[in-house]
Amino acid sequence: MPGSVPRIVMKFGGTSVGDLERIRAVAARVKQQKDAGCDVVVVVSAMAGETNKLVGYCNALSPLHDPKEYDSIVATGEQVTSGLLAIALQALGVKSRSRAGWQIPLVTDSAHGKAGIVSVDGTSLLADMADGIVPVVAGFQGIGPDERITTLGRGGSDTSAVAIAAAVKADRCDIYTDVDGIYTTDPRIVAKARKLDKITYEEMLELASVGAKVLQTRSVGLAMREGVRVQVLSSFVEGEALVEGKLPGSLVVDEDEIVEDKLVTGIAYSRDEAKVSVRRIPDRPGIAAAIFGPLSEAGVNVDMIVQSTGADGTTDMTFTTGKADLPRAISTLESVHDNVQYEELLTDDDVVKISVVGTGMRSHAGVASTMFRTLSERSINIQVISTSEIKVSVLVSADYAELAVRALHTAYGLDGV
Amino acid sequence: MPGSVPRIVMKFGGTSVGDLERIRAVAARVKQQKDAGCDVVVVVSAMAGETNKLVGYCNALSPLHDPKEYDSIVATGEQVTSGLLAIALQALGVKSRSRAGWQIPLVTDSAHGKAGIVSVDGTSLLADMADGIVPVVAGFQGIGPDERITTLGRGGSDTSAVAIAAAVKADRCDIYTDVDGIYTTDPRIVAKARKLDKITYEEMLELASVGAKVLQTRSVGLAMREGVRVQVLSSFVEGEALVEGKLPGSLVVDEDEIVEDKLVTGIAYSRDEAKVSVRRIPDRPGIAAAIFGPLSEAGVNVDMIVQSTGADGTTDMTFTTGKADLPRAISTLESVHDNVQYEELLTDDDVVKISVVGTGMRSHAGVASTMFRTLSERSINIQVISTSEIKVSVLVSADYAELAVRALHTAYGLDGV
């Protein structure tokens, strides 16, 4: 009964295939999974360091190089790894073959260097599996409308893997990486951080976007849209073939699959924040548009926004942006001064954004107030607040980052034993 | 008048593109040729050392690796160089784009690792040139019947270049290498060796096959069949744009183009020779087949063959083969002893083959006798002789290699001033 054979996509990142010894270890792990009766598609990144070397060549020849050539050059890293892993699998007696993006084909748009996936034809991969072959796909790459090689941008191999899992209707997409799962918060800050067995796509998106860089954000969004179950696990832990019910990593799934009833799933923080305050603006309609329109045109990514109107008929507008965008934000605001007529422009990049994330807060009140009370008890001053359906974020002074994360981790009952 | 624009294929080997500085220098040279009013297609090898690194990976993972994977892995070397050179050309203001073998397409058979070219579609390259674009082709590679990447074997970039020159009907195929042309003999042995302005395909074939490894033999044969004029020249000599009548290298052309009337064009030698003598075989029909059939089946490449029959009803059979084939030749001959019933098997790998080559000997007698007399005057004993239409080869003791080459170079009037 072919339908009963579990179909697994296994994706290995650059450190997991960093040298020939590790490639052999990956081959052994893939064989284990295949021997356990699964159909397997493997997706690989370039050997660690290769992509940086090739990018360095491009930059050295021309800082403003043609992204089409960049893609053709950089995509060779994954092509090499996919061939080497196929050889390593064959050496273990596993039938295998490599497939570059254009050999699937994984079709993208023409946005070279950061292409979006248009379609993945699963036919060739399904045919490989039907023949008992393990296809090893070069991640991170596709083919554009003009038959040229494209890349999906840094971290794009995760997205490749999820898109391929969707195309072959895989039961699971296992992302092998250098961490063994997704934690309630950064274990380097909170020793009692716990690994999560399961987390929803939405929670993972919120956690990824505020700095928990285990999975590329785009791959999580794609997994959510396509309903691909994604497991994050370590490639450096010896393990048995993975079967449902005994998965060692963290599973990113639909909310329906989450049994445990938790208010908050994790605490995330991001140091890559800068605060901008535009002060004492004569209050009139259209101020927000006059400020954020030009910022958007200048490519400044704005995150939290707070507006407060004083009794004197002036308004203060405060927002946050990434540290790298701050200079551009300042120059843009200076250029609109004649129009907006603010009195003062204040900036502060010594801030950190802390977020509590959990789908549970949809049905439970009091999550935000617990956060505010906990921080207040530690005398931590909240500068900006923003909330979404499953997240509450606050901006605080960077000095308090670790203290705030630890206090919140305890307050929401996340500490492990 | 488009027909009057010279169309040149420029091919650069691995040392010519060995690092970013050299790639920049190649770009400058290509620009010079383009600025002189030529349409240009560039063909590149991998950066020196890259191919060996990738081959080393394959061998380390599995000595008997899948040649399809080997091809996919190794072909990345040329793909990287073609992209980098396109970037370097663009940085000089020259419109350029890379093309992998499958993007031309250069179609081959399925003999992975040593594929033969089936067809080259010049349409895409001609369209590039019509748009003012310099296409930079990844040499050494093509695409097989099953849409997988193939390679043409070591030195295959020369063959790529010639095949592409034929496909776009190029006026010339310039092979940039680390020597500045083809010499009457090895300049390391004969200080008075002269660079040849022109040489025929046939002569080049004979010289290449006996050790003058400037051009891959297969590329010369292809150039001859397709009538592609090939120039060999140095990429390390600064030069002006090349125009007919002032070409600095050696031109390999059809016999019709050779004006100078020479008896002998060059003296070649090969140290990669071993002599095998099968002695005192009872003379009967079918001996040659009984010996050379099994050798051929064992993959032993046999070159010169001499048979001499004694008065006593026995025959001696002597032949030469490559040094690497000698052990296989010996074991094969031992295995057929019961059938052939020879008395003695003698081998000697301390020999050298010396050849005088020239299309002129077609119409002139006395070339061979000059050779024999010259060697005799130096007391050099000739062990085996073989002749072809434009070549006379002799096997002599390796000790006399340099002496013989120098004496012959002088005897045929090849010494420069």
Image (cartoon, coloured by chain):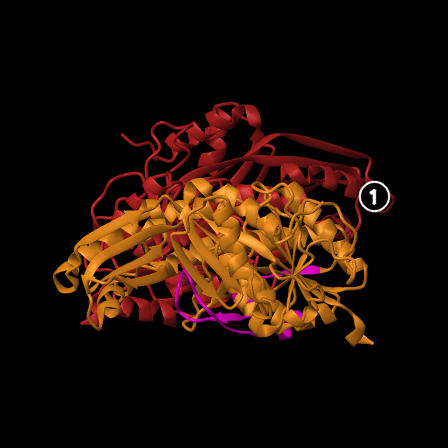
Chain colours: A red, B orange
Residue situated furthest front in the rendering:
B311
Magenta stretch? Answer: B96-125
**Residue at 35 percent of width and 42 percent of height:** A20
Q: Is residue B291 magenta?
A: no
Percent across and percent down for residue A165 are 37, 61
Asked if residue A139 shows in the view, the reply is: no
The front one of A41 and B262 is: B262
Q: Quadrant of residue B284?
A: bottom left
- Is B324 displayed left or right of B380 in the figure? left
The front one of A384 and B334 is: B334
Residue situated furthest right in the rendering:
A338
Percent across and percent down for residue A146 are 60, 69
Q: Quadrant of residue B146?
A: bottom left
- Relative to A188, residue B72 above or below: below
- Relative to A325, residue B312 above or below: below
Percent across and percent down for residue B413 are 65, 52
Report the amino acid beneath label 1. Answer: Ser
**Residue at 51 percent of width and 42 percent of height:** B402
The front one of A119 and B225 is: B225
**Residue at 51 percent of width and 60 percent of height:** B368
The residue under label 1 is A335
Residue situated furthest left in the rendering:
B338
Asked if residue B321 shows in the view, the reply is: yes
- Relative to A270, residue A155 above or below: below
Circle 1: element type: helix
Q: Residues within 10 Å of mark 1 (few under 14, many from 20)?
A: few
